[in-house]
Amino acid sequence: MKFNKWTLALAGAGVVSLASVAQAEEAQMSQVLTAVSSTQLSGYVDTSAIWKFGTGNANLPGRAFDGVGKLDGFNVNVVGVTLEKPLSEDQWAAGYHVQLLFGPDANNYTTSPLGVDSVDGTANTSDFSVKQAYVALRTPIGTGIDWKIGTFTTIVGYESFESYLDPNYSRSFGWQLEPTQHTGILGTYQAGDAISFSAGVANTWVAGVNRRSPRAESMKAYMGSITITAPESWGFLKGSAWYAGLVNGFSGNGRNTTTTYVGGSVATPVEGLSIGGAFDYRFNGPYQFSVPGTPDASANVNWAYAIAGYLSFQATEKLKLNIRGDYSQSADGTFFDSGAPGKNDHNSIGSLTLTADYALWANVISRMEFRWDRSLGGDEPYGASNVGAQTRGPGVNENALTFAANLIYKF
């Protein structure tokens, strides 16, 4: 073992012994190695190719990560890297979770400390986001409360940002109505085999690492949820899950925002077949605070809801088929501006998504997807502008048809 000159000088003066120094350094190194050895590295690389049939590629309202900027070409969507020390079974267990995003989709997630102002939410253009970064702790109260302290993903929603966790490649309309991430504290309690509860407090409803509400120091976001998971004793229903959650707090448009969510998936007696459903409702208002603490009574109330149904069938060992039907209605301007006089004062859109997932390579998700979007209120938002007015003749821009191929490698 090599010693620095200062240590050798102290040893020569009889202040320390080289043997004790060596033992101390070995003990310290052992602690470091023990901590590092329990850390897990994982991640994924998400790519796609998307084609929109016809012209009018400027707008695909309601689409989260597969719209403008990715059509008619090949794409690197996002690279995710996770470092984690999961909680052990100890009563006073401790760990951590760090998840980093790189690539274009990181911009849209809007959690980056680089390129995003923590107050006004300026658009992120850094191709980098801290998706999650929290300390995980357990306190031995009852069956144990698991805590997340830091930045973590939202507690509501049927679908995830990580598309490989979702039945379809493209996201539902409901995804657009939900928060994505919070900075705060979240506790989860498992009450028996079937029921768990979560509750937490965060800075804001809207995403942004360490983001604050400009209205008041005391203005926070509050959240809670309940999950019911069917145990094996429930027969063919085992693995089915039902979920309800609520998040309320300041959002990016200067309003107090409430999101409610109810959803779940159910196994069926038919082997390989499961069904699911989700309902999202978001309410902004009634007041907008352009000046902190000063309500603007002229601001319109903004509301939106989305309903989605899911059907999944494991046809063979390698082939899985997923179908999603999606409908959303919202205040005008949520997804697009109806534009012309006499048009609707709300947005009404629907979609049908068909996805075939076929396992060709180990650790690779390979799937193809066809999606049909349609304006159901007489508007034509799928044209050259994000306005629902007729621009190319009746019915031309009422529909949007896309085809996508998605390849994801997980490690």
Image (cartoon, rainbow, N blue to C red):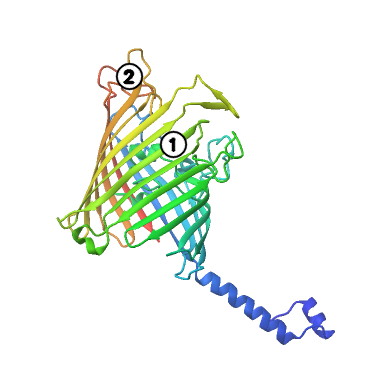
Q: Is residue 106 visible?
A: no
State which tag comes first along the sequence, 2 or 1: 1
The image quadrant of residue 301 is: top left
Q: Residue at x 79, y 81 (%)?
A: 8
Of 407 and 271, the residue lying toward us: 271
Vertical placement of residue 20 versus 40, above or below: below
Of 134 and 322, the residue lying toward us: 134
Residue type at mark 1: give it: Thr
Vertical placement of residue 352 versus 363, above or below: above
Of 1 and 255, the residue lying toward us: 255
Q: Residue at x 63, y 79 (%)?
A: 27
Which secondary structure lies at badge 2?
loop
User: Where is residue 63 shown, x and y percent of the image?
Assistant: 36, 36
Task: Name the quadrant of the N terminus.
Answer: bottom right
Q: Which residue, given by chain and number where applicable, does mark 1 sit on?
A: 258
Q: Residue at x 40, y 54 (%)?
A: 197
Vertical placement of residue 21 versus 152, above or below: below
The image quadrant of residue 399 is: top left
Q: Mark 1 Cα within 10 Å, few/some/many (few <14, many 20+)?
A: many
User: Where is residue 355 shown, x and y percent of the image?
Assistant: 25, 46
Q: CA distance from mark 2 to mark 1?
A: 24 Å
Taking the view exactly as shown, the residue that stands out farthest to the left is: 270
Residue type at mark 2: give it: Asn
Q: Is residue 368 visible?
A: yes
Which secondary structure lies at badge 1?
strand
User: Where is residue 156 shown, x and y percent of the image?
Assistant: 39, 46
- Number of labels in the image equals 2
User: Where is residue 302 shown, x and y percent of the image?
Assistant: 42, 27
Give residue 344's mark. Answer: 2
Q: Is residue 59 left or right of residue 19?
A: left
Q: Is residue 391 left or right of residue 210?
A: left
